[in-house]
Image: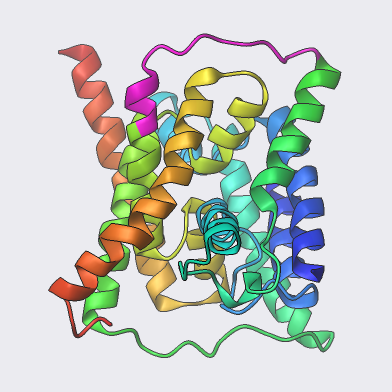
Amino acid sequence: MMAAIATLVAGVVLGYLGQRSRMCFVGGIRDFMLVRDRYLLRGLIAFGVTAWLAFPLMTAIGAPGVGPFGASDVVTVILTACGGFGVGYISTLANGCPFRQHVLAAQGVISSAAYLAGFLAGALIFHAWAAPLLLRLLPAWG
Amino acid sequence: MTGIVGGLLAVIAGSLFEVRPPDAYGLCMACHARDLVDWTINAAAGTQLTVAPASLVFPVLTPIGVLLGALMAARTSGEFRWQQPEHPLKTFLYGILVMNCALLAGGCSIRLLLRTSAGEPAGMIGFGALAAGVIVATQWLRWRATR
């Protein structure tokens, strides 16, 4: 229950700030490539650097830390790379990362609402069909 | 500013507020939405769809929070207005594909960056691949526009 409340509060804060700042996790790289605009890219870098500093800080104050991370097997690495590439490629075509699509849907963009409907349906499709199919094709992965 | 607050909240939620395991799970639009959908369907239909351990008892509510926060911001700034969709079926399919790719990679763009910041090698590979995907798609869009 604690996790649900914490993520709800964090979500409200980030949704508010994300709407005001147009934060997008793929838009930063895209805008920099297209027009050399660093505004969104700065947000992406700030997120990464802040998290990178905050993880050891949490460990220092006695909170549970992260890791150590063991080496992943080759299949997991390949699937992670394929999935990551797909997220980046399709999110760019869709004109925004999943976070940005949530924000746009909340400000009345019906295309983004359609995206969210697909996004939620996608979770069901993945666990009901795509993941079992992958597990059958790649038994070593399971 | 949003980046700094986002990074802090993502780490604090994961470390101090039990949004774990898995590690570096404090913020993810795909995994958290998956947890919410699967948990709800499991509760309603008695199915056994996958949810992360952090969401076993009650699901994480990040997607609802983001929608509420963005709605508040859009309403208070006067930026809320309904905009008719141009290609709703295409964006619906994009949503399906992005969710499937994100669950394959173990996180959306946010969590891949979070895993990279946490020092997870697979997360770094995933984020590198994501950046490559954005670069290739941007080149494709530029090529198509100038053709």
- Residue A138 locus on image (x, y percent): 17, 76
Q: Which residues are magenta?
A: B78-92
- Residue A38 locus on image (x, y percent): 55, 34
At 81% across and 69% down in the image, what residue appears? A2
In the displayed structure image, the side of residue B108 where residue A103 appears, left or right: right
The residue closer to the viewer here, B42 or A106, is: B42
The residue closer to the viewer here, B99 or A127, is: A127
Q: How many marks?
A: 0
In the displayed structure image, the side of residue A31 where residue B37 appears, left or right: right
In the displayed structure image, the side of residue B123 where residue B19 appears, left or right: right
Q: Is residue B147 visible?
A: yes
The residue closer to the viewer here, B76 or B54, is: B54
Q: Is residue A96 visible?
A: no
- Residue B59 locus on image (x, y percent): 66, 63
What is the quadrant of the C terminus of chain A in the image?
bottom left
- Residue A104 locus on image (x, y percent): 60, 26
Residue at the extreme front: B45
In the displayed structure image, the side of residue B139 where residue A40 appears, left or right: right
At 68% across and 48% down in the image, what residue appears? B3
How is this picture coloured? rainbow
Residue A65, image quadrant: bottom right
What is the quadrant of the N terminus of chain A in the image?
bottom right
Whether residue B2 is in magenta: the answer is: no
Residue B39, image quadrant: bottom right
- What secondary structure is the magenta-colored segment mainly? loop
The residue closer to the viewer here, A5 or B15, is: A5
Q: Relative to residue A67, is residue B68 depicted above or below?
A: above
